[in-house]
Image: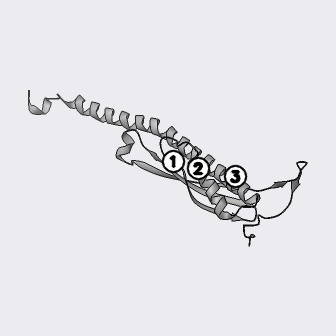
């Protein structure tokens, strides 16, 4: 029997490659749904922060008070997977308030070798609408603190 006919160890290479592939796909199966959930949570938080900011301005508050109200709302929101959500920016035009929030997601599986943490930025918007004493909407066109659209 010559050295070229010796097939011992061929299966160990195959097993190592298959085990690595299974770890990688298992990591994707574990982290992908959690990442999607983190992105959905960030989008929900952005919309909630925009709603709070729009309500603050519609109630007569300033933009600084609206920003503080949105930040307080995010500070009171429990972090998803240990990553808090923070308000990055807020803008308003007419009666529309937009808020950008930021959070992150840390890979928990073997995918952390490739990318440990992923930053997530989401945008939320809310339109302020005044309501009369009988529930009828009052058209006012714009929030007093927000510039008119160009």
Q: Is residue 27 visible?
A: yes
| Residue indicated by mark 3 | 51
* CA neighbours of label 2 inside 10 A, class few (<14), some (14 to 19), many (20+): many
Q: CA distance from mark 3 to mark 1?
A: 19 Å
Image location (x, y in percent) of residue 28: 44, 39
Specify the quadrant of the image occupied by residue 148. Answer: bottom right
- Would you say the residues marked 3 and 2 are in contact, meaning their CB atoms lie under 8 Å apart? no
> Relative to 107, does residue 55 appear above or below in the rendering?
below
Q: Position of residue 119 (x, y in %)?
A: 48, 52
Q: Position of residue 42 (x, y in %)?
A: 57, 48
Query: What residue appears at the point 35 percent right and 36 percent down from the top-left corner?
Result: 21
Query: Which of the 4 image quarters holds residue 41?
Result: top right
Q: Secondary structure at mark 1?
A: loop
- Residue with the mark numbered 1: 84
For label 3, count other residues whose C-alpha is less than 10 Å away and answer few (under 14), some (14-19) or many (20+): many
- The quadrant of the image that shows the N terminus is top left
> Which residue is painted at 86% across and 60% down in the image?
139
Tags 2 and 1 touching, CB below 8 Å: yes
Q: Residue furthest right?
A: 134
Per the model, the C-alpha gap separating discs 2 and 1 is 8 Å
Q: Residue at x 75, y 65 (%)?
A: 94
Q: Which residue is mark 2?
A: 74
Q: Nearer the viewer, residue 4 or 116?
A: 116
């Amino acid at each position: 029997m010559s050295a070229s006919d010796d097939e011992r160890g061929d299966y160990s290479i195959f097993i190592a490659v298959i085990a690595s592939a299974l770890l990688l796909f298992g990591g994707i199966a574990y982290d992908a749904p959690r990442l999607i959930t983190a992105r959905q949570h960030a989008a929900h938080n952005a919309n909630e922060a925009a709603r709070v900011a729009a309500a603050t301005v519609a109630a007569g508050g300033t933009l600084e008070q609206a920003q503080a109200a949105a930040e307080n709302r995010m500070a009171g929101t429990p972090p998803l997977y240990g990553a808090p959500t923070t308000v990055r920016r807020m803008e308003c035009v007419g009666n529309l308030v937009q808020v950008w929030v930021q959070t992150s997601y840390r890979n928990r599986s073997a995918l952390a070798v490739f990318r440990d943490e992923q930053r997530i930025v989401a945008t939320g918007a809310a339109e302020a609408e005044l309501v009369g004493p009988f529930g009828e909407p009052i058209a006012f066109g714009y929030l007093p603190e927000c510039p008119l659209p160009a």
